[in-house]
Image: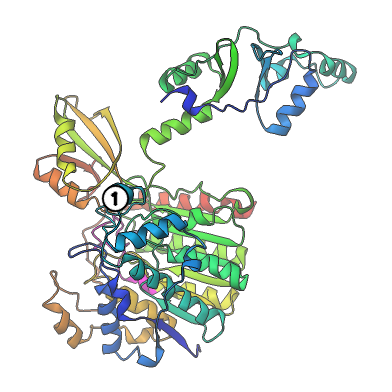
Amino acid sequence: MLVEEMMVTDVITLKKEDSIKNAVDLMKEKKIRHLPIVDRTKTLIGIVTDRDIRSAVPSIFCIDKQKEFLNKPLETIMTTDVITAHPLDFVEEVAATFYKHRIGSLPVVKKEKLVGIITQTDVLKTFVELTGTNQPGTQIEIRVPNKPGTLADILQQIRHFHTNVLSVLIYPDKMKAQSKIIVLRLGTINPNPIINALKEHQYEILWPNLSGYHNG
Amino acid sequence: MDDKIAFVFSNNLLNYKFRQGHPFDQKRIELTIDLLKEIGALSSSQMILPRMATDEELLLVHDPTYIEAVKKAGKGKLSIEQAENFGLGTEDTPIFPNMHEASAIVVGGTLTAVDFVMEQQGKHALHLGGGLHHGFRGKASGFCIYNDCSVAIQYIRKKYDAKVLYIDTDAHHGDGVQWTFYDDPNVCTVSIHETGRYLFPGTGNIYERGHGQGYGYSYNIPLDAFTEDDSFLFAYRKTVSEIARFFQPDVILTQNGADAHYYDPLTHLATTIRIYREVPKLAHELAHQYSEGRWIALGGGGYDIWRVVPRAWALLWLEMTGQVEKATGTLPKRWLEKWGNRSPVSLPETWDDPENLYPPIPRKSEIEEKNRITVEKALQILKG
Ligand SMILES: [Zn+2]
């Protein structure tokens, strides 16, 4: 999935001449934590986060200084070296950027103009959609030998049933190094016919497993 | 003592039939009625006929394009591609002739039960054909075409302006109903089910608490797989009593799916018939305590139609009508003889399940502990 499919395009921004107080109020009102700073041509020139403000604000004991601080223009505290995303970046790249730089949101820039913003929550939502857990379904787990053609064979078995596969995840088997675990999310309330067919083909179903706990 | 109680039924409800061998099989209602008649607990004067839900009533919840699609499908006029968008023509909800009519009477039956109770013709009504809690606004799901529970609740809101407590003890999460009323503070939904970690539909975790105005009016108790009677009943009693006390409902609607039993082929809980004695008992008490007796009970899931559902649903009716003492000892001989040779599995001979119905469950105490914590977390916001 691409950033342009996940990003919010209706971005709330301020100008560098606006006061810090403007930013504080706007963040509170809109319940946001990141404010891109743009110029008249919508070119991105900086970003201000709630963290920037908190770390710059003088101690609450000096009320005068605090007032003076809040009246300063945003350009005095904004970060100008902004990490950005491009509309054609992939969700995996963006997730890695968040992780690496420990940041919560990325302005999306195309030809220097701000066209959107993407937050960790947007990315997380996309990952939830990728696992298919946002649609009604049943999850089954299959232990398979780690060799080519296995997934195709499993899907071949499922083809006979009019059941939608909502997602497929494959991860290494922690118990057995030579095998992998395939997690399928099926759009059905009754996975039994599929489970039986897979068992007939000698696949090991880890769950659902009526005979007890597979790992206990 | 409750004077008049209605049992909504007609043979037309049995037309809600996908195909031979499909797990959702309304023959279980016939088996239940026959069992009740054999013990002299159901008379024809108690039975009332379901009406057909009108399009206008279905539109209280469902999209017009979806209703049109169901109508077309039932006439063989919906293409496979179109059907897929509406969750129709799948293995779960195959297309069958006149499926709109068959589904609209299921909804109508629930509305008949609602009117009976809300117009004070009697205090309680039972409609075993209803309880299709997975149906969505514009999509069939999990054997459910129209969601009679959702339509009925919306109907109660509009016509009677009453606060509705919906209690769902089907082994699957009551997702369709929950999402329909997710931001409505006048409808409180409670679902107690097997965890959605593996089981359909996958939702129903404790943090699904409602949204906006409706925050705090949606409760979920996802029980661990292999949960047994005591732990199930602890979770049910604590959750439902505390929520009823907090919410003070004007009417209680229960979805009494019977698929949490150890024998049920689609789920992995390990309860016995005992819970089907106890679950309606508390709903009955609460209805009298908070809602002047107004209680509408519906069917739902239940896929061991021979060994589990007839006894479970008979007990529901017996509780509603104050005749539970009729369900002791052995099942009526005539009933066992009549159905015994048609059943692919041997029928239980007694009302109660034997002590050793299944081998001991490994990690029993861990499961109980986990469920206890789940209940605590789910009810935490009631304290605040
Ligand atoms: Zn169910």
On screen, residue A1 versus residue B269, left or right, reads right
The chain letter for the residue carrying disc 1 is A
State the count of labels. 1
Q: From the top left corner, tell me how far across and down residue A142 is, in percent.
A: 21, 38
Residue type at numbered disc 1? Thr
Please give the name of the residue rendered at 57% of the width and 23% of the height, measured from the top-left corner: A117
Find disc 1 in the rendering and name its residue: A188
Label 1 secondary element: loop
Count residues near mark 1 (Cα–Cα under 10 Å), then give few for <14, some for 14-19, many for 20+: many
Residue reaching furthest right? A64
Of residues A201 and B261, the one drawn nearer to the viewer in this rendering:
A201
Up the image or down, A172 lies above or below B90; here it is above
Main secondary structure of the magenta stretch: loop
Quadrant in the picture for residue B70: bottom left
Q: Quadrant of ligand 1?
A: bottom left
On whether residue A127 falls in the magenta region, the answer is no
On screen, residue B317 versus residue B165, left or right, reads left
Please give the name of the residue rendered at 60% of the width and 17% of the height, measured from the top-left corner: A114
Please give the name of the residue rendered at 78% of the width and 23% of the height, measured from the top-left corner: A22
On whether residue B274 falls in the magenta region, the answer is yes
Q: From the top left corner, tell me how far across and down residue A57 is, in percent.
A: 77, 17
Q: From the top left corner, tell me how far across and down residue B35 is, in percent.
A: 26, 83
Q: From the top left corner, tell me how far across and down residue B151 is, in percent.
A: 48, 65
Residue A14 in sight = yes
Read off the magenta span. Answer: B259-277
On screen, residue B371 versus residue A78, left or right, reads left
